[in-house]
Amino acid sequence: GFRDYGVIFKVQITKQFPEKTIELNMVEAIPTWVHIYYSEGKRSYRVLPLEAVVVSRNDRILTKNDYVRLEQGLKEMNRHLESLAVPVGNATN
């Protein structure tokens, strides 16, 4: 399932004075994945930007199977965000 996936939205907000208006510009979506793992017998959590992790493939904790799952998750997340007309950002920016 996708319960460990999420999105961080990066939004530029512009306030106009004296008009007292607010504009939301440059909305960017950064798909994420919560990595749950055990370290020294304790459950630990990391929120990882999917695209950056999949592109770099240099995380020493993740396995080959994790990367396969993350690549598929990134495709599904991007497809879903695009269907909502949300620009998918490049997490490496």
Image (cartoon, rainbow, N blue to C red):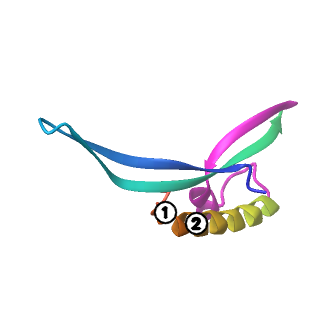
Out of 41 and 81, give the one closest to the viewer.
81
Q: Secondary structure at mark 2?
A: helix
Picture disc at residue 88: 1
Report x, y in % for residue 64.
79, 63
Report x, y in % for residue 15.
23, 40
Check residue 16 for magenta coloring: no
Left/right of residue 93 with respect to residue 70 in the rendered view = left
Report x, y in % for residue 93.
43, 55
Q: Which residues are magenta?
A: 41-63
Instruction: Determine which quarter of the picture holds residue 68.
Output: bottom right
Q: Amino acid at mark 1?
A: Val
Quadrant including the N terminus: bottom right
Out of 64 and 89, give the one closest to the viewer.
89
Picture disc at residue 78: 2
Residue lying furthest right: 41
| Residue 90 at least partly seen | yes
Residue lying furthest left: 18
Task: Name the residue rendered at 76%, 35% in the picture.
Answer: 44
Alpha carbon separation for disc pair 1 and 2 = 7 Å
Circle 1/circle 2 CB separation < 8 Å: yes
| Residue 40 at least partly seen | no
Instruction: Determine which quarter of the picture holds residue 47.
Output: top right
Left/right of residue 66 with respect to residue 41 in the rendered view = left
Q: Residues within 10 Å of mark 1 (few under 14, many from 20)?
A: some
Check residue 53 for magenta coloring: yes
Left/right of residue 19 with respect to residue 39 in the rendered view = left
Out of 74 and 92, give the one closest to the viewer.
74
Q: Residues within 10 Å of mark 2 (few under 14, many from 20)?
A: many
Left/right of residue 59 with respect to residue 8 in the rendered view = right
Q: Amino acid at mark 2?
A: Asn
Task: Name the residue rendered at 68%, 41% in the picture.
Answer: 46
